[in-house]
Image (cartoon, rainbow, N blue to C red):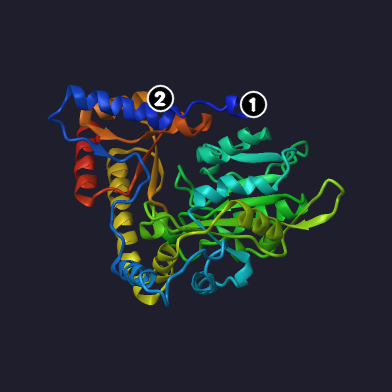
């Protein structure tokens, strides 16, 4: 008789985006002539830049020649991409060794899989509202979760708890944040690093949206903070940075100075454990994709992806300006591609979703889908087409412009 992992039965159904899709499909069926503008999903719309395409095409040609064909590659990534990532971190003041860098098929995979190297007895602290993967992967493992209130009072940048009874072992942080668009400053991150080191906790730091930070005073990496290499693992992605949502490539940093404890109380290198996990359960990112990823970090690649990032941030400014005109409170949009707005007239998140869909055929994401503190809020993304973004905001003004 085969038995299941009963923890999966504790998961809520993935109702958020399936419910959105169902509602939108019903609306389309009833209003076939209406143009729906989708601003809910965090998927990019700009194509891969020329520097990346050329590198991928060249790599395809290499794979067709006996002399340059590549078979199995290193599970942790090719050295040329390690070198590129090292140089990128160096550009904002962070020194990494090559063996601290692990190339992955995206931040989502590693954020979920990293829990393999931690015991299930760990207490996990997760902000609410939150990216659902943090919660679900720990429910799957049966870990105890404590939630950290992220709300308007703390500008959706919650700080370390002062309650001595709360002693988390693993702490999830995301900056710029999905879904709220909030960004931690250096002082705030320093407080978290100090807290983690004082409590022998490990921070799992999701920096997938770091490329959207344009304020030079804000940290792009947690390793800009002294002491972070002793307490933090950082996850990064090329999905939003360079349009790799469909080609899949990211990287995770596990410093060699970072340790956790065995049941016997011995300090164990997490870098070695993650290497062991990856060499066992992961075959690596395809050579062709890694060549394209390396091109992202070239001078030409950086110039080209900045044009796309600027395109999305112009969309964000368009949305933010509309919220200002309409007198609606919102967060994000300046160093983040997400606008997290307070639903007008004290509407519930799903009621506001239905209202926008039925009145102006604009689709966003109800904040309640990200946790209890998301109730009464709504997420709009800047990843859409610029003309559609402008049109959506003009429709929005017909409802709320003062």
Q: Are marks 1 and 2 in contact (CB under 8 Å)?
A: no
In the drawing, what numbered circle is on residue 125? none
Measured in 3D between alpha carbons, the distance from the residue under mark 1 to the one under mark 2, in whole angstroms, is: 43 Å
From the image, tell me which residue sits under label 2.
Answer: 348
What secondary structure is found at the residue carrying circle 2? loop
Above-or-below relation of 189 to 358: below
**How many numbered marks, from 0 up?**
2
Task: Give residue 344's position: percent from left, percent from top.
Answer: 35, 30
Q: Is residue 402 visible?
A: no
In the picture, measured across the screen, residue 208 lies left or right of residue 146, that is: left
Above-or-below relation of 388 to 291: above
Name the image quarter holding the C terminus: top left
Task: Give residue 45's position: percent from left, percent from top.
Answer: 29, 51
Furthest-front residue in this view? 66
From the image, tell me which residue sits under label 1.
Answer: 2
Q: Is residue 226 visible?
A: yes
Residue located 42% across and 30% down the image: 16
What secondary structure is found at the residue carrying circle 1? loop
Name the image quarter holding the N terminus: top right
Q: Residues within 10 Å of mark 2 (few under 14, many from 20)?
A: some
Task: Give residue 60's position: percent from left, percent from top.
Answer: 35, 67
Q: Nearer the viewer, mark 1 or mark 2?
A: 1
Question: In this view of the protein, which residue sits in the foreground, 139 or 3?
Answer: 3
Question: In this view of the protein, which residue sits in the foreground, 68 or 220?
Answer: 68
């Amino acid at each position: 008789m085969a038995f299941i992992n009963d923890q999966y039965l504790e998961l809520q159904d993935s109702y958020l985006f399936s419910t959105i899709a169902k509602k939108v499909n019903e609306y389309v069926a009833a209003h076939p002539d209406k143009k729906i503008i989708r601003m809910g999903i965090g998927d990019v719309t700009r194509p891969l830049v020329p520097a990346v395409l050329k590198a991928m095409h060249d790599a395809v040609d290499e794979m067709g020649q006996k002399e340059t064909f590549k078979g199995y590659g290193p599970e942790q990534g090719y050295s040329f991409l390690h070198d590129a990532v090292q140089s990128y971190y160096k550009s904002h003041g962070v020194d990494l060794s090559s063996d601290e860098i692990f190339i992955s098929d995206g931040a989502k995979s590693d954020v979920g899989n990293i829990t393999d190297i931690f015991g299930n007895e760990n207490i996990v602290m997760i902000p609410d509202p939150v990216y659902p993967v943090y919660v679900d992967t720990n429910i799957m493992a049966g870990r105890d979760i404590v939630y950290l209130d992220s709300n308007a009072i703390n500008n959706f940048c919650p700080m370390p708890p002062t309650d001595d009874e709360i002693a988390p072992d693993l702490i999830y942080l995301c900056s710029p944040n999905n879904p709220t668009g909030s960004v931690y400053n250096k002082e705030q991150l320093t407080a978290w690093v100090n807290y983690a080191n004082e409590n022998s906790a490990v921070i799992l730091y999701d920096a997938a949206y770091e490329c959207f930070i344009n304020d030079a005073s804000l940290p792009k990496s947690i390793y800009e903070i002294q002491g972070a290499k002793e307490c933090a693992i950082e996850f990064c992605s090329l999905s939003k940075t360079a349009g790799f949502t469909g080609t899949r490539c990211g990287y995770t940093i596990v410093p060699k100075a970072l340790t956790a404890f065995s049941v016997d109380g011995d300090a164990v290198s997490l870098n070695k454990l993650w290497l062991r996990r990856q060499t066992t359960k992961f075959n690596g990112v395809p050579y062709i994709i890694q060549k394209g990823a390396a091109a992202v970090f070239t001078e030409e690649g950086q110039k080209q992806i900045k044009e796309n990032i600027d395109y999305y941030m112009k969309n964000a400014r368009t949305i933010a300006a509309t919220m200002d005109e309409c007198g609606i409170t919102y967060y994000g949009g300046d160093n983040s591609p997400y606008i997290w707005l307070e639903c007008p007239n004290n509407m519930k998140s799903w009621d506001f979703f239905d209202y926008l869909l039925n009145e102006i055929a604009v689709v966003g994401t109800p904040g309640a889908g990200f946790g209890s503190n998301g109730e009464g809020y709504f997420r709009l993304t800047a990843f859409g087409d610029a003309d559609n973004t402008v049109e959506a905001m003009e429709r929005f003004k017909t409802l709320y412009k003062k």
